[in-house]
Structure formats: C-alpha cells, structure tokens
Amino acid sequence: MKLVISQPMYFPWVGLLEQVRIADRFVHYDDVQLARGFYNRVQVKTNCGSKWMTVPLRDAHRGQLLNEVEADEREDWRGKHRHLLKQAYAGAPFIGDMLDVVDQVFSQALPHLAAISRASTMAIADYFGLTESRVFFDSSLLCIPGKSSQRLFDICQHLRATTYVTGHGAKNYLDHALFECGGIAVEYMDYSCLPYQQLHGTFTPYVSGLDLIANCGHDGLKYINPSTRPWKEFFNEP
C-alpha cells in the first residue's frame, strides 16, 4: 500500500496531482510549522509571464501551525485571484470548468490556511476523478505526536503503509535507514511533467493545476502520469 504525506498546497501544480494519483492513501500534513513554501501561493501563466497568486495571511509568524494560520479577510483576495484567472485564461477552451472549480473552493467558509489549501487540492483532484479510489487523512486528526522522520514513519506504520512515496525535498532530511529497518520502502517521485497545449508561449509545468483544467478539461487526466524510483536509485542519479 502506497502512502503519500504532503504539506497542503494552494491550487497545486500537476506534480502534486501525480502524488495523489499514485497514492492508495494520502495524508494532508496540516499541523506542521509555517515556513516558506507553497501553502498559500502558486504561479499562474499569463500573457505577461508567470505571476504569483498568493493568499494573504493575518498576523502569521514562524512557529505557528498551518492549521492555526488564518487568511487575511480584510482584503478581497478571492476576488483578485478569480479576476487574475479569468483574464489569464480568457482564450482557454475550458475556462468555465476551471472557474467552477475555483468558485467551489471560494464559496466555502474555511477556518484556516491549511483548510483552504486542502480544499483547493481536493477540488482539482475531484475534477479529474482522483478522489474516488483513495482514502484521505489530515495529520492533525491522526493524533500521532513527534516530528521529522520519526513522525512520518509512525504515520506510515499507523496507516499500514508498505511504501512511502515522497517528493524531492525529502532527500535533504529523511532518515531512510529508519524506514528500511522498519520494513517500509521509500520511493521518490519521478515527475513526468508531460507537455500539453498551453496558452502564452513555451510550456511550463510549474504552474497551478488549474492551468491543466482550463486548457484540457477532463482530458487532462492523461497528463497526470505518475512514476517513482526507489530511494537508492534516486540518490545515485548523475
């Protein structure tokens, strides 16, 4: 059984959707400390290049947990984001589908940043049918203490994973020996980044998955094509 544990991302890129697709069980790692990342921001491709779409945070500080950080509702960030997306994808064939997904998220009263990011991920995943045969969890509800590799390992054991699938950033901190000794295989994502027809020039995979919806509709599922490599093979690549 393959398990993915990922920090929440705001309308994430296709690489995270590949992680969702390859997982049997997926954990939203929503109770880790706030740091620089993609919890509240993502790039959108426009006719003026890629632009950041960022959820403003209210009184956020380092050390806060993601499920404690609040969006700053003193400004209309939802309206700004929708306007940016409507302009950027004005010529896209499935702009209506994309805006429907956005509106589905924005219509919810979500209590904190982790919930906003989780909802945005699930909305895109649901559009592509990726929620039907997988089980999703929030780490905050698993009641498993600890930190770093030990906590990840304990979550894997609790959910009876045989394989832990992770992104490339784990190369810098994961205790691979801990997993190996515990009988849990570690695999790294081998992101496919398959090109598809995009607006606004040369293809880039490093934009929101909303881009895939706007340009390809439900047919975009074929571009979410995950594969992995065992950790030792990943480490030994040139």
Image (spheres, rainbow, N blue to C red):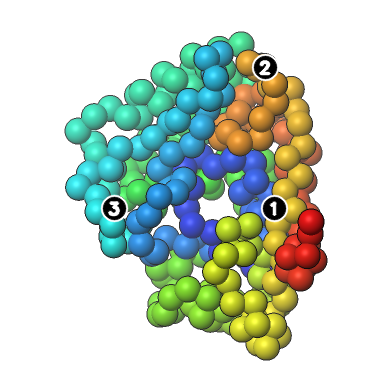
> Which residue was labeled with disc 1?
21
Residue 236 visible here: yes
> How many residues crowd around disc 2 within 10 Å: few (fewer than 14), some, or many (20 or more)?
few
Quote the CA–CA distance across marks 3 and 1.
28 Å
Circle nearer the N terminus (1, 2): 1
Q: Are marks 1 and 2 in contact (CB under 8 Å)?
A: no
Q: Considering the numbered disc 3 on the image, is that residue within a helix, a strand or a loop?
A: loop
Residue sitting at x 49%, y 17%: 86
Q: Residue furthest top?
A: 91
Residue 159 visible here: no
Q: Judge depth for marks 3 and 1 and give the one in front.
A: 3
Quote the CA–CA distance across marks 1 and 2.
28 Å
Relative horizontal placement of residue 136, taking residue 68 as reference (left or right): right
Residue sitting at x 23%, y 36%: 73
Q: Are marks 3 and 1 in contact (CB under 8 Å)?
A: no
Q: Considering the numbered disc 2 on the image, is that residue within a helix, a strand or a loop?
A: loop
Q: Is residue 197 above or below residue 24?
A: above
Relative horizontal placement of residue 29, taking residue 130 as reference (left or right): left
x, y percentage for residue 21?
69, 53
Q: Which mark is residue 201?
A: 2
> How many residues crowd around disc 1 within 10 Å: few (fewer than 14), some, or many (20 or more)?
many
x, y percentage for residue 19?
66, 54
The type of residue carrying mark 2 is: Gly
Q: Nearer the viewer, residue 130 or 53?
A: 53
The type of residue carrying mark 3 is: Val
> Which residue was labeled with disc 3?
69
Q: Considering the numbered disc 1 on the image, is that residue within a helix, a strand or a loop?
A: helix
Circle nearer the N terminus (3, 1): 1
